[in-house]
Image (cartoon, rainbow, N blue to C red):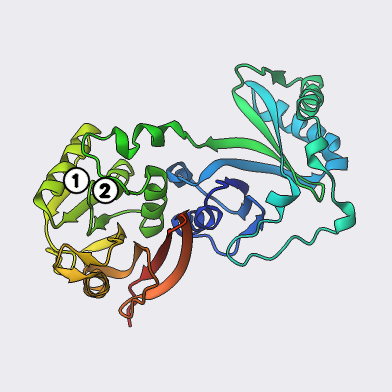
Amino acid sequence: MLHAFLLSGDYLDLARAEIEYLLCLTNPRVMGRVLIYQGYVGENVRRLALTKEVVKVFSITSLDEINRSFEELAEYLSLTFCGKCCVRVKCFSLGSFGSETRGAGKSEADASTEINTEKIDKVAMERELGAILWKKGVKISVSSPDRIVRVYIFPDSTTIIGLLEFRLDTKQFSKRHPEKRPFFRPGVMLPKLCRALVNISTLKGVFLDPLCGTGGFVIEASLLGLRAVGVELYPDIAKGCRENLRYFSLSADVVCGNAAQLPLKDCSVDGIATDTPYYQSSKSLYSRDELLSKASEEFCRVLRVGGRAVVVTNCDCDFPSLKTLDEFRVRVHGSLTRRIYVLEKTGV
């Protein structure tokens, strides 16, 4: 079973990583903002934060052959589907098509075959393709369809045709924006990115944010059904984190503690995600470098073998006690670029 994932345009590298770690994919085909995977994906796709939609692929063809492919699709739908359909076309520009992620190979398209997708009349094409389905007996409704037939068109004329299976509800993240929580501190990570990093850290089990602050990671982990634990050094901030959890009717264990001396048993955690302090000292307890060094040793201690820690910093770091699987850089503004490290506890 072939699926196409439309990646969020603002975090392409992380969007691909979220899919690969959460769904355990290896070396999927990448075409600009679209990741293509052969295999079963299941309900876990609904956890994704950086994938705008998922399409069950019916065919990958060329633009010249799209009408013939739609006739075949019409035959399939007339036998398997009784509801109403509509067609939605998305065209990718040359810039987005050529944007590879994490070292993926470039498209093999011949430059002479490139088309200007910006000149395609998408509305007219949707009507024409919908008419092909209608003539074969498929019911059509533009305003209230039961299924959406999705068409992706790339500049090399490659065309993906399939049925929309999942579309991300982006409004959920604005409802959980840090400024809308009862307890707020500036500079915290936004919910969409928090959820993606939780997904990268673990699929199930016990999740830990050892520097939980106002609770962004703990909130997202709780919503995903994980057993979430937050550790916060300062009692007033820990109290605020609990207040934010209650605001969203969530429960999690939030305790006062030190990330360099975690109050947890060895090998008791499945995944960690945390946003470390960006300033040079942590309120006189440790320097930033000392905090990261001591905390990473604790991450290794409490993680189960094979467990992952996703650590966000504003500086280049080494984590000798853990294996580095991935490193990402996300520019926030002129003076801040986040480093996101994906680390693993090995059995060695």
Rendered location of residue 52, percent (x, y): 54, 41
Residue drawn at the location 33% of the way across and 80% of the way down = 320
User: Is residue 40 at all visible to an observer of this figure?
Assistant: yes
Between disc 2 and disc 1, the foreground one is 2
* Residue farthest front in this picture: 334
Asked whether disc 2 touches disc 1, contact meaning CB atoms under 8 Å apart, the reply is yes
* Relative horizontal placement of residue 182, taking residue 327 as reference (left or right): left
The C terminus lies in which quarter of the figure?
bottom left
In the image, residue 286 sits, relative to residue 87, either above or below, namely below
The disc at residue 252 is 1
Label 2 belongs to which residue?
218
The picture quadrant where one finds residue 81 is top right
* Relative horizontal placement of residue 73, taking residue 281 as reference (left or right): right
Residue drawn at the location 32% of the way across and 48% of the way down = 188
Rendered location of residue 44, percent (x, y): 44, 46
In the image, residue 220 sits, relative to residue 211, either above or below, namely above
Mark 2 lies on a secondary structure that is helix
Instruction: Between residue 160 and residue 186, name the one nearer to us.
Output: 186
* Residue farthest right in this picture: 112
* Relative horizontal placement of residue 216, taking residue 118 as reference (left or right): left
Residue drawn at the location 73% of the way across and 45% of the way down = 93
The picture quadrant where one finds residue 75 is top right
Estimate how packed mark 2 is, as few (under 14), some (14 to 19) or many (20 or more) residues with alpha carbons within 10 Å: many
Estimate how packed mark 1 is, as few (under 14), some (14 to 19) or many (20 or more) residues with alpha carbons within 10 Å: some
* Relative horizontal placement of residue 176, taking residue 214 as reference (left or right): right
Instruction: Between residue 278 and residue 111, name the one nearer to us.
Output: 278
Give the amino acid at mark 2: Val
Instruction: Between residue 115 and residue 229, name the one nearer to us.
Output: 115
The picture quadrant where one finds residue 63 is top right
Rendered location of residue 259, percent (x, y): 18, 64
